[in-house]
Amino acid sequence: MNKAFTREVDREDEEDDDVAAPPLPQGAKNYITVAGYQRLRRELMTLLDEERPKVVETVSWAAKNGDRSENGDYLYGKKRLREIDRRIRFLTKRLDVAEVVDPSLHHGNEQVFFGATVRYASDHGEERTIRILGVDEAESAHGEVSWIAPIARALLKARVGDEVRLTTPRGVEVLEVLEVRYPAPAPEAVAGTARVKA
């Protein structure tokens, strides 16, 4: 295989890393909840300790079976290995720059900060509930939004009863903050806090 072709393929893999990473504002920290960090860390460790070794073993076995150009196990294994390595690089980079935040520290607070679950009403009378999370953990299908999303940026630092303005493609909407919730501190965190104060 031509080395120039190999370098080109490697460069494409590196470029894919940047495409897969949701963008952060320049100079911004990569905020993430404790649960989100643990989930990404578990995924990374599973890839490193379980999936990658299995695929390497399969590729090694398939390579011994002769002609690699028509060997489906070998070709698929190499492709899967590139995907795993790309995901490992992505997770490693994101976890290295992650700023872990514990939203339960704001439990009982009525102001919107990172990690809040916010119920709000639009000026059209529609009510919605969202949870403001990190770029790498928010899933819109579950009512979660990234802290850099326009709706989150409009709501951040508002308090229950405040009205905020959100610019949308349809124009400016006025949103009223109806409720702000944070998760309760974990029992071991409460016990640990009590020990520190004593």
Image: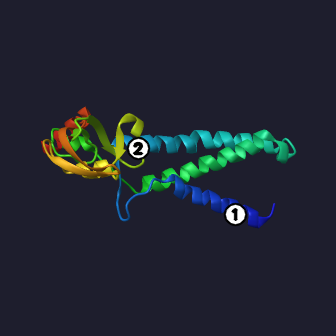
Three-letter amino acid code at disc 2? Glu
Q: CA distance from mark 1 to mark 2?
A: 31 Å
> What is the residue that sits farthest to the front in this orientation?
170
Quadrant assignment for the N terminus: bottom right
In this picture, is 165 found above or below 6? above
> Are dots 1 and 2 in contact, CB under 8 Å?
no
How many residues crowd around disc 2 within 10 Å: few (fewer than 14), some, or many (20 or more)?
Answer: some
Residue 43: percent from the left, percent from the top? 50, 41
> What is the residue that sits farthest to the top in this orientation?
187
Residue topped by disc 2: 137
User: Foreground: 91 or 170?
Assistant: 170
Residue 86: percent from the left, percent from the top? 58, 52
Three-letter amino acid code at disc 1? Glu
> What is the residue that sits farthest to the right in this orientation?
66
* SS type, badge 2: loop
Q: How many marks?
A: 2
Q: Does residue 25 appear to the left or right of 196 in the view shown?
A: right
Residue at image location 49% in from the left, 50% down from the top: 91
Q: Splitting the image into 4 quarters, where does residue 108 fall?
A: top left
Q: Which mark is residue 8?
A: 1
